[in-house]
Amino acid sequence: MTDLSKLRGEHSAIQKIVDKLSFLLSQPSQPPRLHLFALRHELSSTLITHLKTADWLLYPRLMASHDPDIASTARLFSEEMGGLSAAYVGHCKNWDADAITADWTGYCADSRELIRALNYRMTRESRELYPLLEALDRAA
């Protein structure tokens, strides 16, 4: 599987998990803890894998391009989007089981913001970065 196929597959997996989480967040009351935390764990492991793949394979390859536009775009993306991982870790630390139970509405609002940031990153990667990787693959 090429790097691009792997990245697209990870986006698809993340989106499926986010859709399930979004459904839970639309409910007026908290779902069973085990269900919510199983979904959060699934998102964490899938998202961390994807972020590592992007940070270790996608960005370095694009930044090493001899095409200055590709390298510059990759650097800008890396700088702009690099904070998502830290934001996600902070979200998970802030929202443990007790905090979620104490403020389901706040958790939902904060989670929706995180999902928006995640969807924004995936959309931009798909539309702007992945075509650059495809161009490098064709040129190789």
Image (cartoon, helix red, strand yellow):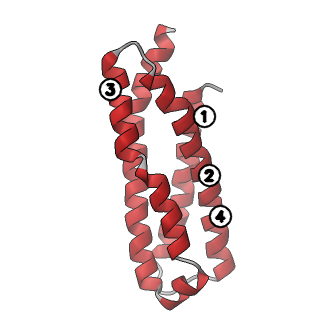
Numbered label attached to residue 6: 1
| Badge 4 amino acid | His
| Badge 2 amino acid | Thr
Q: Of residues 109 and 69, which is closer to you in this image?
A: 69
Numbered label attached to residue 41: 4
Circle 3 residue: 72
| Badge 3 amino acid | Ser
| Badge 1 amino acid | Lys
Is there CB contact under 8 Å for labels 4 and 2? no
Q: Is residue 134 above or below residue 125?
A: above
Quarter of the figure with residue 6: top right
Number of other residues with Cα within 10 Å of mark 2, as a class: few under 14, some 14 to 19, many 20 or more: some
Distance from Cα at disc 1 to Cα at disc 4: 20 Å
- In-image side of 115 versus 14 (left or right): left
x then y, percent, for residue 133: 46, 23
Q: Residue at the spot x=32%, y=26% of the render?
A: 72
